[in-house]
Image: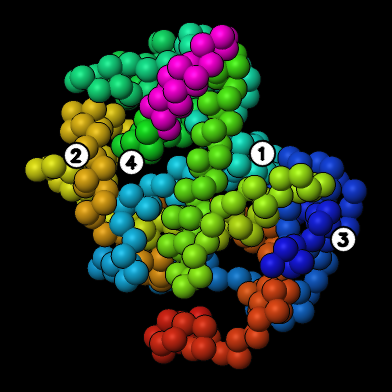
Amino acid sequence: RADMVDSPNLYTSDHSYITVDAHFNTSHFARGLPPIPENCPTPMGVKGPTVLPDPDEMVQKLFTRHKFIPEEYGSNLLFTFFAQHFTHMFFKTDLKKGPGHTWGGHGVDVSHIYGPDKHTENLLRSNSDGKLKTQVINGEEWPPHVDEAPVKMLYPPHIPREKQMAIGHEFFGLLPGLIVFSTIWVREHNRVCDVLREVHPDWVDEQLFQTAKLIVLGETIKIVIEDYVQHLSRYNYKLKFNPEVLFGQAFQYQNRISVEFNHLYHWHPLMPESFHVGDREYSIPEYVFNMDVSTQQGMKNMVDSLVQQQAGKVTNNNHPKMTLHVAKETIIHGRTLRFQSLNQYRQRFRLQPYTSFEELTGEKETAAYLEE
């Protein structure tokens, strides 16, 4: 599939033609197809309506959940939060510059664990035995308090400071499921440091830290390929991460995150209407920015609950109410970015274009609305 991706990258969202910036200015997301030129007769180029449908109406008709639709291939909330935790490593839209820009990197750099820059990373480090800072709550290790590691976090004003954790991504205080994965990786980093220190007692803090970080990066890639992508793809072929294949070979690789990839990954329908943890049920408003769900329930209860609860299906009319604003923003951003039509992308990736909306949706009601 690598030959389907332009390398070097050809387009950015600022130009409908090839530019040098597309390759060298990595503050841009890449693009699979260039934007529709601004001087075209319709928003979609030369076809389609002169005025696109109202985003609020589209959200109401196409996205709003009326009844929870479960995912049919066994995806659970552990998968859901792993996906969110992992992909926010490189989906970091810089909305101050516009939806075509990123404030992050373009690869698996584990910045969602260690922070987006050296300053944040240093604040999260304990500077002892290569380890990251932690705090103990109810007999378990969790990421440190923001007073112990004063990194930038996006907590709303009503969240008491004593209920704020310092995590590698500013957004990850939002949901207890994200705190779970942040905690797992902090604990894993520190466990690896203990193993390295036993094997290499002469290593100083810096070498222990950097080597543990490299190992955590490798573990991340292995889990993503062999478990996460394996589950997503539903291939009968067993996927393997085997970097030894390239040992001793002259090999270079550059990755760029595409803005289309960023938009497609809005998988909010995976979220349920409520979260069952232990003997409690939390509504979405009770769950968000609530560190106590994790620390009071404990890691075992949290992981068990995420494994046992089924995720929603990523389909139309299955978006929970609390995330409908994200669906609307995504529609608006897609128009700002002047994405080409779905059929243009299907042709770009050697797929047959759809000939009708019913062929796209597989049913008549939604197809009729889209046709209208």
**Residue name at image x 67 percent, y 52 percent:** 245
From where the camera sits, is residue 286 visible? no
Identify the mark nearer the N-term, 4 or 3: 3
Q: Residue at x 22, y 54 (%)?
A: 308
Residue 358 left/right relative to 275 = right
Which mark is first along the chain, 4 or 1?
1
For this rendering, which residue is in front, 313 or 76? 76
Q: Secondary structure at mark 1?
A: loop
Residue at the disc numbered 2: 301
Q: Position of residue 282 (x, y in %)?
A: 19, 44
> How much space separates mark 2 and mark 1, taking CA atoms?
34 Å
Say which label, 3 or 1, has the lower sequence index: 3
Q: Residues within 10 Å of mark 3 (few under 14, many from 20)?
A: some
Q: Mark on residue 105?
A: 1
Q: Are marks 3 and 1 in contact (CB under 8 Å)?
A: no
Query: With respect to residue 13, does 301 lie above or below?
Result: above
Q: Which residues are magenta?
A: 185-205
For the residues labelled 2 and 1, say whether their Cβ atoms are less than 8 Å apart.
no
